Image (tube, grey):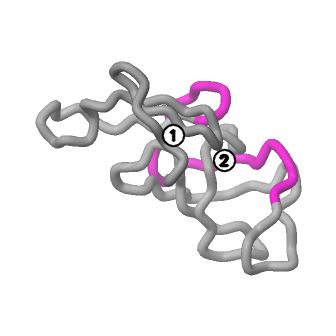
Amino acid sequence: MENTYPDGDNYICADCGHEWPIASGNGEGGEALVVRDVNGNVLNSGDTVTVIKDLKVKGSSIPLKQGTVIRNIRLVDGDEEHIEGSSDKIKGLVLKVCFLKKA
């Protein structure tokens, strides 16, 4: 995002408050990307998640209501903050994991 800034050994996002190490993402560490939901549970491709609050969806007049189930999620390569999935009514969603919990 455009509102990130370095602070010591970390980058910080002013929009969501997320912090991550500056050294990550250079491909040398060989560490696997770990995506976690709002409760800290590890998410994997194919998991089912639940929306924890009502969300407005860009490009759609239908909001995503609290409790909506997103089945068969896909992890975004190189991004631990977003997943891809579809609900029953809205296809092709990209969601932030801070609004999701593992079902």
Instruction: Check disc 1: other Cα within 10 Å, few if <14, some if 14-19, many if 20+.
Output: many
In the picture of the structure, the residue carrying the numbered disc 1 is 43
Residue 16 is covered by the magenta coloring:
no
Instruction: Give whichever of discs 1 and 2 has the lower sequence position.
Output: 1
Question: Answer yes or no: do the residues labelled 1 and 2 have beta carbons within 8 Å?
Answer: yes
Residue in the image at 54% along x and 61% along y: 84
Q: Nearer the viewer, residue 59 or 87?
A: 59
Residue in the image at 62% along x and 49% along y: 96
Q: The residue under label 1 is which amino acid type?
A: Leu
Q: Nearer the viewer, residue 10 or 87?
A: 10
Q: Nearer the viewer, residue 88 or 2?
A: 2
Quadrant position of residue 9: top left
Extent of the magenta region: 37-55
| Above/below status of 88 relative to 95 | below
Q: Secondary structure at mark 1?
A: strand
Q: Position of residue 74 (x, y in %)?
A: 48, 58
Q: Does residue 45 appear anywhere in the picture? A: yes
Q: Secondary structure at mark 2?
A: strand
Q: Position of residue 88 (x, y in %)?
A: 75, 71
Question: Is 6 left or right of 37, judged from the image as shown?
Answer: left
| Above/below status of 84 relative to 45 | below
Q: Nearer the viewer, residue 31 or 43?
A: 31
Q: Does residue 103 appear anywhere in the picture? A: no
Residue in the image at 78% along x and 75% along y: 89
Residue 49's tag is 2
Residue 56's tag is none
Instruction: Check disc 2: other Cα within 10 Å, few if <14, some if 14-19, many if 20+.
Output: many
